[in-house]
Image: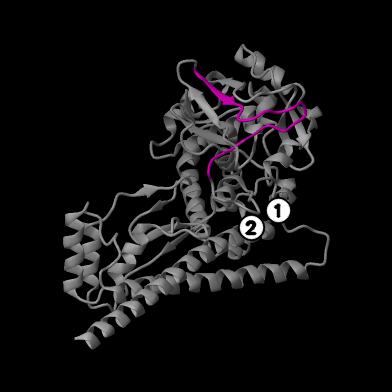
Amino acid sequence: MNPILGRCSHYYRASLFCATHLNLSTCSLKKSVCSYDEDCLDFLPWLSRKSGGHISPFLSIGNSSTYGRCLFASKCIYTGDSILKVPYSVQLSPDNLPPLIKSLLENEVSDNAKLAVVILVEQKLGENSEWAPYISRLPRLGNLNSTIFWSNEDLEMIEESSLYQETIKQKTQIEEDFLAIKPALQHFPSLFQEVTLKEFKHAYGLVSSRAWTSTKGVSMIPFADFLNHDGISEADVLCDEAKQLSEVIADRDYAPGDQVMIRYGKFSNRTLLLDFGFTLATNVYDQVQIELDIPHHDPLRTMKMDLLCRHSTPVLEDDNAFSSCGNSFVIKQVKSGSRKGRGIPQSLRAFARVICSTSSQELGDLAVEAAKIDGRLARQPLQNHNIELQAHQFLLSRINQLIERYDTAVKSLAVASSLCMSNKVIPRRNLAQDLLNGELRVLKSAGAWLKNYCDTLKQNSKRSNITSSDEEDLL
């Protein structure tokens, strides 16, 4: 039994943005009692008939006042119970593409785009689709809130976050995929007539927010995708290749009526908002992606760039599939009292040490030191305390600049919200506030650690100078 690989995905109902601002504990989540969803009473029997077996003896589809559609315990569930099994045969994947359409799609088209075409096909078939009970219960056009659906004006609210550029990149990819699949769809005018970019983007958003990536590939798992996200849950979707099914194992006890939840992943609000369209008011996995560069006016720029290139480290992806490489770094929250500054990448501190080096001799010494250890450059504190201090003051200055910009953006959103006198809810503004507040909290934690480190270096330098002066007096 292996865990699902990559991002497990699920959509969050568009009408429930108020839920993104509740800091719910595990206890309160467990006490969230659900009622039956009358519109879905026939769904599980249909899926069981289609699969030829029982999907779940424990779960029913319901509604929660906080989360909307959900799965809840219909009887007692105990830790370790297998609460859900969905065979591969009733999961939608690119393999479900009609052969004629599949043969016309270019190899460059992504799996997400191919699965989006599967959804478009089934949507066009309507009641004639064998998947109609599932397709008809997917969110309707306009009901997804990933940032890929935000207007340019909406996106300006999150311009300080790297999510801004990530969203633009995703939008561009979707448009490129649409141009690639459109000629294939035009071969079937009776089925598709004219598919718009808006329709394709919606289908793509359904895939991004609901599909899991496993050894089977990208697939949508009916019923399992009604499970909502609990950031501190240890339960996730597992794949059993031998039995050809996906499974969920309970990580805690549930009483009848309790909502059952899983963790989609250790995702920051940046990922949750891009892929799923929701945020958490307090997210322990929040992080900030920052970029640094060597100034063009630096006379040692060429040498420094060459040194960094020769001693580059492997690209390491974090839990959100974002990577620290080159001059781009991911900062996570630094716990107060941390002596080692866990959360601030060593590669970032090394980059700063190289930037602040002032001579070719210093750079040469760094290269020699790297060769003696493990090839990684400037990972140890510099022996020259003055340059070590300058490097971290440089980082602190950069972090403080970002803190100031984030703080201004957050205050601007707060003012805009207070000026809105109508009863109309502005959910995207609230989502933007959660995103920026979370990243601001990370930046402040990193800034506090760097300031403390710089203060310690200054104190040590003063003690060293006093000691040296005393020694000279003795001589």
Mark 2 closeness class: few <14, some 14–19, many ≥20 residues within 10 Å = many
Report the amino acid beneath label 1.
Answer: His
Q: Nearer the viewer, residue 342 or 204?
A: 342
Q: Which residue is mark 2?
A: 434
| Residue 327 location (% of width, % of height) | 35, 62
Q: Quadrant of residue 86?
A: top right
**How far is mark 2 from mark 1, CA to CA?**
8 Å
Residue 465 in sight here: yes
Q: Nearer the viewer, residue 359 or 84?
A: 359
Main secondary structure along the magenta-highlighted residues: loop
The colour mode here is: one colour
Give the magenta-colored segment's residue range: 244-266
Task: Name the residue: 76% across, 36% down.
Answer: 31
Q: Which residue is mark 1?
A: 21
Q: Earlier in the sequence, mark 2 or mark 1?
A: 1
Residue contact between numbered discs 2 and 1, judged by CB atoms under 8 Å: yes
| Residue 397 location (% of width, % of height) | 44, 74
Question: Circle 1 sits in a helix, a strand or a loop, which is it?
Answer: helix
Task: Name the residue: 50% across, 44% down.
Answer: 178
